[in-house]
Amino acid sequence: MSDWTLIGTINDIPRRGARCVVTPQGKIAVFRTQKDQVFAIDDHCPHKGGPLSQGIVHGAAVTCPLHNWAICLETGKALGADEGSVKTIEIRLDGERILARLEHVAMAAE
């Protein structure tokens, strides 16, 4: 089951920048491009787990700050000769509000 969750506003993220958001499922990186597109992916590089939210945003991609792997923000896939991918999170803008489609963790009955 999943639901739309408010995770911030577009003004919280500078153009060509990112923010890390902690969710019950882990950390996600939320990016804003120069053209005000917003994307969200897991905040770890598939190569060595580097924090993608600290990477450099260029176009619709981010470059990992540890080993320069480029990751497509639309698909989560590594670009160029690198192989691997990260999970993408569906994003919806409601005015300036950023909503993410997050999966809810089912609670076990006690």
Image: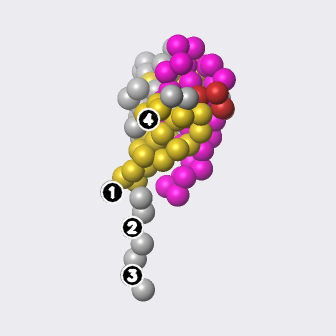
Q: Is the residue 84 above or below the residue 34 in the image?
A: below
- In terms of image quadrants, where is residue 81? top left
- Gap in angstroms between the C-alphas marked 3 and 1: 17 Å
Name which residue lies at 59% across and 50% down: 22
Secondary structure of the residue carrying tag 3 is loop
Secondary structure of the residue carrying tag 1 is loop
- Gap in angstroms between the C-alphas marked 1 and 2: 9 Å
Give the residues in magenta: 13-40
- In terms of image quadrants, where is residue 58? top right
Q: What residue type is labelled 1?
A: Met
Q: Which mark is residue 1?
A: 1
Q: Which amino acid does label 3 sit on?
A: Ala
How packed mark 1 is, by other alpha carbons closer than 10 Å (few <14, some 14-19, many 20 or more), is few
How packed mark 4 is, by other alpha carbons closer than 10 Å (few <14, some 14-19, many 20 or more), is many
| Label pair 1/4, CB-CB below 8 angstroms | no
Name the residue tied to disc 3: 109
Q: Is the magenta stretch mostly helix, strand or loop?
A: strand
Name the residue tied to disc 2: 106
Secondary structure of the residue carrying tag 4 is strand
Q: What residue type is labelled 4?
A: Ile
- Mark 1 and mark 4 lie on one chain; the one further toward the N terminus is 1
